[in-house]
Amino acid sequence: MLLARVGMGDRAAFKALYGLTAGVLLATAARVLQDRHAAEDVVQEVFAHLWHKASETTAPSTRTLAWLCVVTRNRAVDHLRKRPTEVSIHGQADDGEEIVHDAASEQPGVFEQLSFEQDQQRLQRCLGQLDPEPRQAVLLAYVEGLTHVELAGRLQRPLGTIKAWTRRSLMALKLCMGSIA
């Protein structure tokens, strides 16, 4: 096992482990951070920590990649928590002196962003479980704002069918979104 060899200071094993896992870990960190440079920093930290502390690390004997992904994701979330939630506003006083004020950022916070992304992924999974025509009806209704009558005309289906599709689809989505949460 590569991880055990890394724990004994084997540089070749470390290089091999890096080659096998770095791309996946970078994708994991980038998905959380939405910033490639920050994700690269996280992966570098994970590998530096692994190199220096591998002999003390209690990784599972199998599923090393999954374990490294969890470690990387957790490290990326830690980075998000450390990001400032304030922005500096620079101005100039009447006498020409520069003034700097810290104000709360209007951007959603880290946890709001993560929650939104998770909700979006959940919704995509749940939409994927609907049959194609009812899914299209729901998307047209809620994305384009079409009425039942407009949907019936666009999809060339009876009004009753459109109403049944949207009602059943919304119930299925509600059930699916609630069961995943």
Image (cartoon, grey):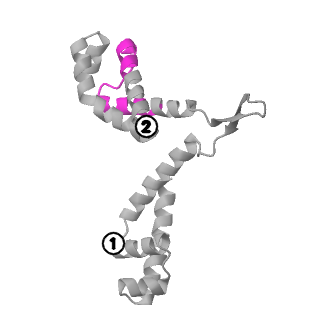
Q: How packed is label 1: few (under 14 Cα within 10 Å), some, or many (20 or more)? A: few
Q: Nearer the viewer, residue 134 or 91?
A: 91
Amino acid type at circle 2 is Asp
Residue 47 placed where, x, y %? 36, 21
Task: Tell me what residue is drawn at x 40 percent, y 87 percent.
Answer: 153
Examine the structure image and report whether residue 52 is included in the region drawn in magenta: yes
Residue 106 placed where, x, y %? 63, 46
Residue 152 placed where, x, y %? 41, 86
Amino acid type at circle 1 is Pro
Q: CA distance from mark 2 to mark 1?
A: 34 Å
| Image quadrant where residue 88 sits | top right
Q: In this rendering, does residue 112 appear at all?
A: yes
Quadrant where the N terminus sits is: top left
Secondary structure beneath disc 1? helix
Read off the magenta span: 47-74
Left or right of 61, for residue 122 = right
Name the residue that disc number 1 marks. Answer: 132
**Label ID, residue 38:** none
Residue 37 placed where, x, y %? 40, 31
Q: In this rendering, does residue 1 appear at all?
A: no
Note whether 115 is above or below 164 in the view shown.
Answer: above
Q: Residue furthest top?
A: 9
Q: How packed is label 2: few (under 14 Cα within 10 Å), some, or many (20 or more)? A: few
Secondary structure beneath disc 2? loop
**Marks 2 & 1, CB-CB < 8 Å contact:** no
Task: Tell me what residue is drawn at x 51 percent, y 65 percent.
Answer: 174
Task: Tell me what residue is drawn at x 52 percent, y 34 percent.
Answer: 80
Name the residue that disc number 2 marks. Answer: 35
Left or right of 4, for residue 69 = right
Q: Earlier in the sequence, mark 2 or mark 1?
A: 2
